[in-house]
Each structure stands twice: as structure tokens, then as C-alpha cells.
Image (cartoon, helix red, strand yellow):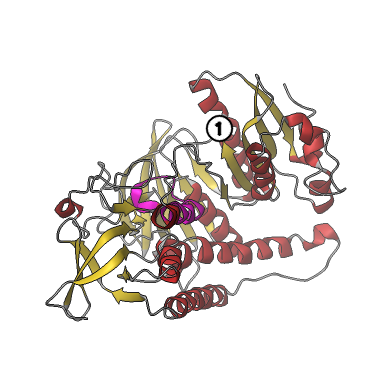
Amino acid sequence: MNSSKAEKFDVIIIGAGQAGKPLAIYLAEAGWKVAIIEREHLGGSCVNYGCTPTKMLLASAQLAFQARRADDYGVKIGKVSVDFQAVMKRKNEAILSSREGIEDRLGEFDKIDLIRGEASFLGKRSIAVTQESGKILNLTAKRIVIDTGTSPRVPTIEGLEGTPYLTSKTALDLDELPKHLLIIGGGYIGLEFAQMFLRFGSKVTIVESDKQILGKEDKDVAEKMREILEEEGIGVYLNAKIEKVAKENGGVKLSIQSADETIDLVGSHLLVAVGTTPNTKALKPDAAGIKTDKQGSIKVDEYLETAQKGVFAVGDVKGGPEFTHISYDDHRILLERFLEKKKRSIKKRPVPYTVFTDPQLGRIGMSEKEAKKQKIKVKIAKMPMDQVARANETEHIKGFMKVLIDAGNDQILGAAILGMEGGEIMAMLQIAMMGKLRYQKLRDGVFAHPTLAESLNNLFKEVK
């Protein structure tokens, strides 16, 4: 590629994440000349420090937990120990395999140029890529797609800058198990890491500034989750203001203000899990007339187009919701637009998600507090998991199912399933929502016994 003259492409994709990668492949199959630029690892957050690695680690932690419960099932297996380095090796091998698989797949297409380096805008349709060697490549295209994702956000806390700390990325590079892990943040990521490390053998303490963990969820869901985590041995401080952070005997000391008293928490490691920040600074979006919000997220319209015509943003970089399945759907929206001239809006797109704690929290649609805020009249079906036959038989009875129903037409508006395989049960309810089924159809449906699906019969008998 000639660095002195801009090379022309049909589309330039900045970032090889869960939207950028498939978009490049399908457009290349359609005959488009594609440049896909990646500054770090192929696959985005999902493959490298999100879904794949964390869920693999959670699976190992879950197995250790279940093994320790073997006596409850009448099974004798002796003392259970975790080889943390072997656990991390398994995770690392899976990440490497995924990266190599993506690179091999992209390499199958003559129409795709995979370019390694840092991309930045020079103008409306032009990109400069600074490579590791210092060489700068100039590219131009009629269409540009931004898929640069996010990085863990680091808050401003006194003493944090001079204290070693972990993020959701660097925690995956640990080669030793923390003796006592302090976690700042009681959101989805913080909770998954908390339970995972507890089950590996760490002591774990969560510090949350809000009045509840899982701040976006209904109060009853958040309180039940906290109860479950505390019963397992995780310490949780709510309404906790962090005063300062400091080094302490090779570890870290976290000074917090909670319940009108100052508490010093001392741990071996500190994990900061307070959200993300978009990867847009190096991109220089202003040079292309692309607008960002206060956090730096790329502003898009309901069709994923930025303020600059012909430039689009997909995935996490455009702000929430930050989920792999949303990123993947973003690429389908652009495919339809580019290849079929169809414009599909993201406005009414469903946003299902699952928190992979044990038990899982599967969520779809409206929460109860959202319904109240919008003054929507609802009926609620709620049932504890200890009334589910399958849960009892397998001794996974923690949590409850909660479904919101439109009082006017009896259709499902949303659900929170905090229980065994909560994400899978949630997906069943999502399908019912897609089909606009009235809840009575599920209440009266014939499902195989004893499955989790069968619990919907009894759940919808509890509509109030």
C-alpha cells in the first residue's frame, strides 16, 4: 500500500469487534473493497476481555463451587482445590484461538485489507493509520464505520493514581489468586468478578456508592441479589463514599465513609469496576465533523449514522446499551442499508441481557420502576425459585421470577428472572413478547416435565 497517496476503498471499518468483523466479511462477499483497521487484538472486548474469557472463568468457578457441594448430592470427591494458573491458561488458550480464527477468516478474502495501527480522521472521508513502525497510511472511502469500542473507566479518587489497581481487563492477566479482593462498583461486571474470585478462593468485598447494587434494576431484584451474594460470603457496603486509596503492606487500603463512620478496608488487590469510557480520543472525530457526547461516545441517529453523512458508529463506542448482541445487530442494520437500501431503526429494538452470576439474572423489556415512571398500568407475576420443580431437584432454588404484564392487553412488557438459567428462561419470555402472546398462552401451555419451561405454568397463575 502506498503511504504517500490515499488508497480508495468502498468502506473503511475502524475496529474489528463484534460488529466490524462480520460487516467486513459480508461486504467483501458482496464484492466490496474493504479496509478493516485494528490497533490491538481482533475480536473486540467480547473475545479478549469480555464474554469469552469471563464466562470461561465463571464456568471454572461454578464447577469448583458445585464440587464443594458434592456432599449435598451424596457424592464423595474429597477436598477441592483450584489451580488458578491452569484456569487462566485455559482461558488464554481460548482467547488466542479465537483471535487466530478471526485473522484466518479475514485472510480468506482478497477484498479485505486488514491494517494494523491507530486510526484517526484527517477529514470527512479520509483516515490516517499510524502503524507500530511509525509508517503512516492514508485511506479514503465513501463510507466509514467506527467500531472502536470502550475501555474500563477509571474514576478520580484520592490516591488511586499512585496505587496498583486492576480493571476488568487487567484482572484477566493475573497469575496469582488475590487473597482479599476489594471491588469498587456493584454493577454487572463487579458482581460477576466478585462471585468468580470468591469461588476460586479469594475473600471478596464490594463497595458501592449507590443505595443498591445493580442500580438499574428494581429494588427487589437488587436486594435479593445482594442477599444471595452475602449468604455466599461476599461483603457488601452500600451508600459508601470512597475517601481515599493507599498502599498498605504490599496491598491496598480503601477508606470509605459508610453509615456516618469511616471504615478502612485492607485487601491484597483492588478492582475498579465502575463502567467504561469510549475509545474516541485518538480517533479525532472533530476532524470529520463527528459529534460526541460528554463522555466521548459517538452520537448517532436511529439508523446509526453520525453527524457526518456516510460515517456510522456501531457497538459500544456509540454509548449504551453495551452488549455483544447489540453490536452484532448493529452490523446487520448497516448491511441492510448498504446492500439492500433499507433503513432499520434502533429505537424500538429489544435489549435482552444476562448477568452471569449464579444464579443468573436474565432481563428483557421494562422494569417495574420504568413502568411506574411512565405511568403504565401493569399486572405482575412473581414466584420464588423454590417453587420450581426443576430447581428443587437440582438444588438451585435461590432467587425468583418476576414478569410485568400490560394490564390492558395481557401481553408481557418485561421480565427479571433471577434464578437457575435465568437467561434462558428470559429468552423464552422474549420470544413470547416477539409473538405478542398474552400471558394466558404460557400459563396454559403444555411444557415437558420437569423442565424450567414448565415453571411458566405456575408463574402465570400468580398474576396480581
Q: Nearer the viewer, residue 20 or 401?
A: 20
Q: Is residue 368 shown above or below 322?
A: above
**192 over 126 or under it: above or below:** above
Q: Quadrant of the C terminus?
A: top right
Give the residues in magenta: 316-334
Is 23 in front, or is 80? 23
Q: Nearer the viewer, residue 246 or 157?
A: 157
In the image: residue 303, left or right of residue 204 = left
- Rendered residue at 72%/30% (across/down): 438
- On the image, the x and y values in percent for residue 121 come to 18, 60
| Residue drawn at 39 percent across, 56 percent down | 338
Q: Residue 413 vs residue 246: left or right? A: right
Q: Is residue 262 above or below residue 181?
A: above
Q: Tell me the quarter of the picture where residue 242 sits.
A: top left
Q: What is the quadrant of residue 23 in the picture?
A: bottom left
* Residue 326 counted in the magenta span: yes
- Position of 112 compared to 52: left or right? left
Nearer the observer, 426 or 330? 330
- Examine the residues drawn in magenta and state their main secondary structure: helix
Tell me where residue 346 appears, x and y as whole percent.
44, 42
Instruction: Judge whether residue 321 is colored magenta.
Output: yes
Residue drawn at (67%, 40%) of the image: 429
The image position of residue 238, as x and y in percent, is 47, 37
The residue tagged 1 is 366
Q: Position of residue 115 (x, y in %)?
A: 29, 75
Q: Is residue 363 above or below residue 31?
A: above
Q: Quadrant of the N terminus?
A: bottom left
Tag 1: Cα neighbours inside 10 Å, few (<14), some, or many (≥20)?
Answer: some
Residue 157 can be seen, yes or no: no
Helix, strand, or loop for circle 1?
Answer: loop
